[in-house]
Image: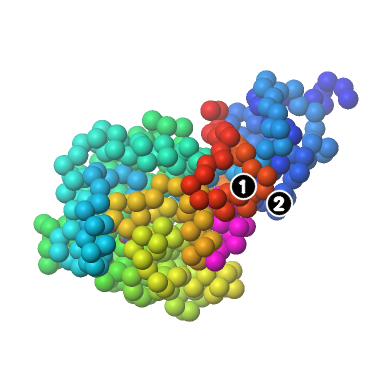
Amino acid sequence: MNSESVLSCDRLWQNARLATMAASGVVEDGVIACQDSQIVYVGSRTEAPAFRAAEVVDCARRWITPGLIDCHTHLVHASDRAHEFELRLAGASYEEIALAGGGIVSTMKATRAASEAELVEAAVPRLDALIAEGVTTIEIKSGYGLSLDDELKMLRAARRLGEARGVMVKTSLLAAHALPPEFAGDADGYVAHICDAIIPAAARAGLADAVDGFCESIGFTPAQIERVFQAAKAHDLPVKLHAEQLSNSHGAALAARYGALSADHLEHLDDAGVAAMACAGTVAVLLPGAYYFTRETLPPPIAKLRAAGVPMALATDCNPGTSPLSSLLLAMNLGATLFRLTVEECLAGITREAARALGILDQVGTLEVGKSCDLAIWDIERPAELVYRIGANPLHQRVWRRH
Ligand code: DI6
Ligand code: FE
């Protein structure tokens, strides 16, 4: 081979088994070449062009997957709610605690009292736990500020976490999470404030990548959420929704009508909601950590979602009230055992489908040429081990672009 046909790259991983999560599937004797933080070749060694690499890594037949993506978290918040957990163990329900002034509003008080730097500091250990398992992209919501200044403070803290650690952060403005005390009895007034002040300010500051809401009997009605969605659209922001978690408010169908990236939770989703999501291509984000921790008994209609071809993602929902979970590996195990997801669905749910749920499948989520070189390299014999083990972390190395 003459020297002109030798390509240069920054880094080359070889002797690896690849779970590409793309059409190429599994590659047994695989090679990945990275140049300027992008994948420039991925595939079998025998078909690879000749590379001159600044750094060559022998993977000793370890498995490589795309870097993991946690597409639904409330990572930024102050304090915890361990005392409410004890109340629930003694018989109180999540709704009862929320109605008695606990729940989201108790985290709101702590979050309002914290500075931006304190919010970053509190979230770093949770982020580091996720990163230690190979997470390279994370979505972080606001929703515990519930005022203009405090919602923006949360979003700035989320952006700063992305700068503090090598990880891509996508933010979602979740001002429509709960009613703050200063708007007690005036949910419509708060929704107007969200639409007229909070969404425009977040959009102007470039702090929100999407707008989210909590459509629920203890949250906001579909009519209120629709106004939030209209304001989001007016600012060119994509929408997503916490829907059908505790009851059926037909939020998923509403989200689908607005072309939502995702509808999340979905335990109480009905057939019309499944059909609407399938038609709109809205991703179902499944959150088995919240289902487990709140001791829900009705799982989302997985078989119907699967049959209708609704893409399914999996996430931690890391939050202090219903899912104090900072492990995507455990989220997969819970998804398999509690929701009967297949291993393939679990792995796709924290890579390809999670990227789809964030609207960034063109950049991350699979091992394909042109995507960011975000990799997780595993000490395993087969990918099923990532779903099967409980409390083990077989990550060998995480690669985030140049890092
Ligand atoms: N659904 C949830 O599971 C979280 N938010 C939501 O809308 C719970 C948030 C919390 O209890 O703090
Ligand atoms: Fe959530």
At x 44%, y 60%, the residue is 288
At x 15%, y 60%, the residue is 101
SS class, disc 2: loop
Q: Is residue 283 visible?
A: no
Between residues 304 and 3, which one lies in front from this camera angle? 304
Q: In the displayed structure, does residue 269 sit left or right of residue 322?
A: right
**Quarter holding residue 369:** top right
Image coords of residue 48 (percent x, y):
79, 35
Q: Please, which residue is most extreme toward the right here?
A: 1
- Residue 227, labelled with which disc? none
| Disc 2 packing (10 Å; few <14; some 14–19; many ≥20) | few
Q: Is residue 349 magenta?
A: yes
**Quarter holding residue 11:** top right
Callout 1 amino acid: Thr
Q: Is mark 2 within 8 Å of ligand 2?
A: no
Ranked by sequence position, the earlier of labels 1 and 2 is 2
Q: CA distance from mark 1 to mark 2?
A: 10 Å
Q: Is residue 130 above or below residue 178?
A: above
Q: Which residues are magenta?
A: 340-352
| Disc 1 packing (10 Å; few <14; some 14–19; many ≥20) | many
* Residue annotated with mark 1: 366
* Residue annotated with mark 2: 25
At x 46%, y 32%, the residue is 166
Callout 2 amino acid: Gly
Image coords of residue 220 (percent x, y):
26, 67
Q: Is residue 234 magenta?
A: no
Q: In the displayed structure, does residue 283 sit left or right of residue 99?
A: right
**Quarter holding residue 342:** bottom right
Image coords of residue 283 (percent x, y):
50, 62
Q: Quadrant of the N terminus?
A: top right
